[in-house]
Image (cartoon, helix red, strand yellow):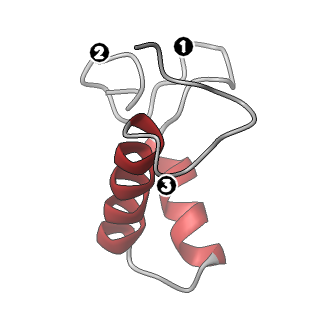
Amino acid sequence: MCISCGCMVPDDNHGDERYIVMQDIVEAAEAGKATVEQTWKNIVETMNQVREGKLKSQAWTPSK
């Protein structure tokens, strides 16, 4: 998937750089000197904590 839309094409940003593609995850892993798997795990855990209200995000607040 362009990871964010669910199209199941991991490298296609549909001509819009706002979509998250696999290359973004790979580059984030490299920047953090982590594996792609650990980076993905970190993304999921952070998202879960924001959704649960344990962490705050200035960019997004989950609806209740």
> Which tag is nearer the camera, tag 1 or tag 3?
3
**Labels 1 & 3 near each other (Cβ < 8 A):** no
Q: Earlier in the sequence, mark 1 or mark 3?
A: 1
Three-letter amino acid code of the residue under disc 1: His
The reply, left or right, for residue 22 in relation to residue 60 is left
Mark 1 element type: loop
Q: Which mark is residue 14?
A: 1
Q: Residue at x 47, y 82 (%)?
A: 34
Q: Which mark is residue 7?
A: 2
Quadrant of the rendered structure where residue 38 is?
bottom left
Three-letter amino acid code of the residue under disc 2: Cys
Residue under circle 3? Answer: 25
**Labels 2 & 1 near each other (Cβ < 8 A):** yes
Q: Residue at x 67, y 23 (%)?
A: 18
Q: Residue at x 38, y 32 (%)?
A: 3
Q: Earlier in the sequence, mark 2 or mark 1?
A: 2
Mark 2 element type: loop
